[in-house]
C-alpha cells in the first residue's frame, strides 16, 4: 500500500513558519513517546508490527487505490477497500496508543515536548480566547511540575488527548458506516478515500490537539452567537424532577392565562417578591426571566413550598 | 426563545446523564445537541438547550444501537463522555400523547 496518508484537518489561517514550528514540536513529542517502548509493561504476546506488515500484504490489493481504479467500480470493491483501510488504521492506532501509554517513564522528554507543541499552537492559533485556552492547557501541564508529581499531569494530558482521538475516530467511523450502506452515486470512492484518510488522521496527536483547540474555538463561536454557558446540569432524582415539573407547569399556566395574582404568588414562593411586578408585563417578565436560575439552585424544593404549586 | 449551554460531567453514567437532561428539560427547555469540549482544562459534555414554552416529553439516553423504545423517536445521536469513556449515545423522546 504505497499511498501517502495525509492529514485532512480543517483549514487554518497560519503562516508557513508557524505550521513548521507546530509540526516540529509535535514530531519531537512523538519521537519522545516512541523512543522507548513497553516501559513498565510486559512485552506484548504478539507483534503488532508483524501483524501490520502481514495485513498490508494480505490486503494489498483491496486496500490499494491503484488496484481499485484498475477495475470496474462497484459497491463491493469500494467497501472492501474501506474494510482494508479501516482494519490497517485500527491496528496502527492500537500500536500507537500502546507506545504512547508505555512511555510514562520518559516523562520529562515527552511532556516537555508536548508542552512545546501546545505552546506553539497557542502562539499560532487564531483568536484571543483560543490562545488563552491553549496557554492555560500548557500551563496546566507544565506550570505545576515543580510541586506536583509529574506523572500525574502526563497521564491526565495523555488521557485527555487519547479520549479526544477516540471520540474523533468514532465520529468518522460512524460517517463511514453510513457511507457503506449507500450506492456509489451517493457515496463515491473518492469520498470513501477521503473518509478513510480522515479516520487515520483522527488517531493522531496533532488531530487531537487541533480538536481541543476547535472545541475552544467553538466555545468562542457560541459566545459570539449569544449562547451563554450557564453552569453544570445536576443529576436529579425522579421525585425532584416531578416537583420541578409541577412548579414549572404552574408558572407556564399562570403566565399563559395572564393570571396576575397567581404570578405574584409564584414570585413570592420562589423568593422573587423583590422583582418588579406592578403590571402584568412586569410580573411575567420577572417570573419567566428568573425561575430557571432559582430552580437550578434548588434541586430539592424547600419543604415549606413543596406542594403549593 | 433563546438557547444556552450546560456542562454535564464526563464521569457520569448514562443513567445519571439522562436524569441531568430530564432535570434541565423540566425547566421548559429542550435538548438540542451535545458535543465534547474543553472547559476549564478538562474535557466534558457541553450540551445545548433551547428555552421553550412547554415541558417536553421525557427523553431516554441509550447506548448507540440499542433497540428503540416503544413510541419514541430519535432526536440526537453522537459521542458523549460516559463514565469517563467516549460513547456513542442515542437520545430518544417519547411521542406526545
Image (tube, rainbow, N blue to C red):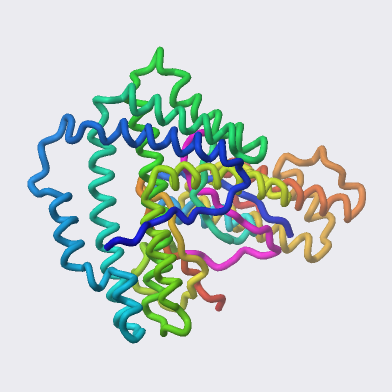
Give the vertical position of B85 relative to A21 (above or below): below
User: Relative to B1, is A106 on the left or the right?
Assistant: left
In the rendering, at what x and y percent does residue A27 appear? 39, 37
Q: Residue at x 35, y 78 (%)?
A: A69
In the rendered structure, the answer to whether residue A39 lies left or right of residue A127 reads left
Q: Position of residue A124 (x, y in %)?
A: 59, 36
Q: Quadrant of residue A147?
A: top left
Does the image show residue A200?
yes
| The N terminus of chain A sits in image quarter | bottom left
Q: Which residues are magenta?
A: B41-59
Q: Quadrant of the C terminus of chain A?
A: bottom right
One can see residue B69 in this view: no
* Residue placed most toward the observer, B55 or A184: A184
Residue lying at the far right in this picture: please name it: A279
Instruction: Return the x and y of residue A243 as percentages of the image width and height.
Output: 56, 53
Q: Is residue B25 magenta?
A: no
Left or right, A49 with respect to A195, comes to left
Front residue of A5 and B4: A5
In front: A31, or A131? Answer: A31
* Outermost residue to the left: A45
Is residue B42 shown in magenta?
A: yes
Tell me residue A46's x, y (percent). Answer: 9, 49
Looking at the image, is B60 positioned above or below residue A20? below
Amino acid at each position: 500500500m504505497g499511498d501517502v496518508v495525509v492529514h485532512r484537518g480543517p483549514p487554518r489561517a497560519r503562516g508557513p513558519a508557524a505550521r513548521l514550528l507546530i509540526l516540529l514540536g509535535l514530531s519531537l513529542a512523538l519521537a519522545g513517546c516512541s523512543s522507548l517502548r513497553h516501559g513498565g509493561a510486559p512485552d506484548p504476546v504478539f507483534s503488532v508490527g508483524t501483524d501490520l506488515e502481514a495485513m498490508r500484504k494480505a490486503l494489498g490489493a483491496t486496500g490499494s487505490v491503484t488496484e481499485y481504479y484498475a477495475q470496474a467500480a462497484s459497491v463491493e470493491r469500494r467497501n472492501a477497500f474501506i474494510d482494508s483501510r479501516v482494519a490497517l488504521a485500527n491496528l496502527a492506532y492500537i500500536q500507537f496508543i500502546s507506545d504512547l501509554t508505555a512511555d510514562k517513564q520518559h516523562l520529562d522528554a515527552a511532556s516537555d515536548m508536548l508542552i512545546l507543541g501546545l505552546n506553539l499552537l497557542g502562539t499560532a492559533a487564531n483568536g484571543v480566547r483560543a490562545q488563552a485556552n491553549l496557554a492555560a492547557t500548557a500551563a496546566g501541564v507544565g506550570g505545576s511540575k515543580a510541586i506536583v508529581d509529574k506523572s500525574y499531569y502526563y497521564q491526565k494530558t495523555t488521557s485527555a488527548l487519547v479520549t479526544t482521538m477516540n471520540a474523533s475516530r468514532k465520529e468518522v467511523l460512524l460517517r463511514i458506516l453510513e457511507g457503506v450502506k449507500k450506492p456509489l452515486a451517493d457515496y463515491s470512492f473518492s469520498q470513501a478515500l477521503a473518509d478513510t484518510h480522515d479516520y487515520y488522521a483522527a488517531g493522531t496527536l496533532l488531530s487531537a490537539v487541533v480538536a481541543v483547540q476547535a472545541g475552544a474555538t467553538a466555545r468562542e463561536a457560541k459566545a459570539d452567537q449569544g449562547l451563554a454557558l450557564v453552569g453544570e446540569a445536576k443529576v436529579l432524582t425522579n421525585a425532584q424532577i416531578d416537583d420541578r415539573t409541577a412548579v414549572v407547569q404552574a408558572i407556564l399556566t399562570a403566565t399563559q392565562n395572564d393570571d396576575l395574582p397567581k404570578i405574584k404568588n409564584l414570585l413570592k414562593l420562589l423568593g422573587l417578591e423583590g422583582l418588579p411586578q406592578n403590571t402584568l408585563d412586569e410580573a411575567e417578565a420577572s417570573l419567566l426571566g428568573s425561575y430557571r436560575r432559582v430552580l437550578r439552585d434548588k434541586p430539592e424544593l424547600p419543604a415549606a413550598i413543596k406542594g403549593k404549586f | 426563545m433563546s438557547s444556552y449551554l450546560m456542562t454535564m460531567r464526563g464521569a457520569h453514567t448514562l443513567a445519571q446523564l439522562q436524569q441531568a437532561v430530564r432535570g434541565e428539560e423540566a425547566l421548559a427547555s429542550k435538548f438540542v445537541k451535545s458535543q465534547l469540549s474543553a472547559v476549564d482544562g478538562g474535557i466534558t459534555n457541553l450540551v445545548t438547550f433551547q428555552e421553550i414554552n412547554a415541558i417536553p416529553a421525557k427523553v431516554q439516553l441509550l447506548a448507540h444501537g440499542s433497540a428503540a423504545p416503544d413510541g419514541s423517536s430519535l432526536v440526537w445521536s453522537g459521542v458523549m463522555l460516559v463514565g469517563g469513556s467516549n460513547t456513542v449515545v442515542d437520545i430518544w423522546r417519547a411521542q406526545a400523547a
